[in-house]
Amino acid sequence: MYPRRIISLAPTHTEILYFLGAEDRVIGVTENCDYPEEVLKKETFGSWAYPDISKILNAKPDLVCTFSNHQIDFARMLRDNGIEVFHADPPDVKMAIEDIRKLGNLLQVDDVESKVESLLVRLHRVNEKIFDAKNRPQVFRIMNWAPLVTVGNGAFQNDVIRLAGGKNIFGDMKKPYFNVSLIDVKKRDPEVIFFCEQELKERILTDPSWETISAVRKKKIYCFPCGFTCRSGPRIVDMVEELARVLHPGLFTKQ
């Protein structure tokens, strides 16, 4: 079955390949790929930020999976060397799931449609629960602390917030990722703040310059695993579910 020798240069693609049941065809990943746990046994080809192109070419893969604007030049370089590349950079959850379907079809995965449908069913269940929610909490997603970076329209995290029943305080910005000032955040006054670095919670709660923000006063500050918040693989649905429980706890029963 073609392709048989796949190298994944992004944790998102690695998770998708395992979700599709194609792990036996994966000959290499990056140092950043850590899920599922068995991926740690795979040979590594540099990092997500700095893949080892020479090593990749020597491995003679028949498919390399690249991700995001950061890896566009790497994708072009590989194609120039005659290697097939699957590149993705989804702006929303719908396209993230469509990327899973496209990769599954490329790999000729027999049950790709049922796998994709299982994700869509879970998203539909969340939508049913929050459909009549009277309040859509204002949410601030911290991508980086120094400088302070967040997400806008065009980032899949923006869509995650929407599907979870929230409203991104910077959702009106027509760029996916950008720097903001604390003054900007205060003006928009988020009711919920989330991120993926555990140490940020204590830092925000103990910093006097943040204390007037609603989310801080009410201690609605949450840390989620990076695998949920920063990757657009199948666990993007987990992120929607978990964030929806945070934003609308009364609509979800504990399981």
Image (spheres, helix red, strand yellow):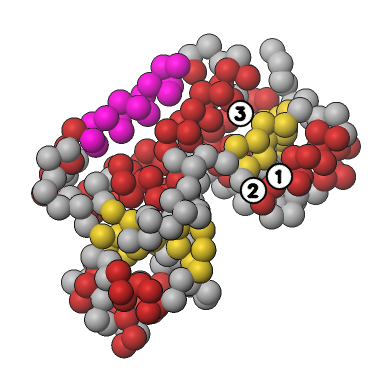
The residue sitting at 58% across, 30% down in the picture is: 17
For residue 15, the mark is: none
Q: Percent x, y for residue 122? A: 30, 31
Reading the image, the residue beneath label 1 is 72
Could you give the CA–CA distance between mark 1 and mark 3, rounded to whole angstroms?
A: 24 Å
Please name the amino acid that badge 2 sits on.
Answer: Asn
Query: Which residue is more in the foreground, 203 or 213?
Result: 213
The residue sitting at 27% across, 30% down in the picture is: 124
Other residues around mark 1 within 10 Å, as few (<14) / some (14–19) / many (≥20): some
Q: Compared with residue 57, is residue 167 higher up or lower down, i.e. above or below? A: below
For residue 69, the mark is: 2
Could you give the CA–CA distance between mark 2 and mark 1, rounded to whole angstroms?
A: 5 Å
Please name the amino acid that badge 3 sits on.
Answer: Glu
Please name the amino acid that badge 1 sits on.
Answer: Ile
Quick one: label 2 or label 3, which is nearer the N terminus? 3
Q: Compared with residue 70, is residue 241 higher up or lower down, i.e. above or below? A: above
Residue 223 is one of the magenta-drawn residues: no
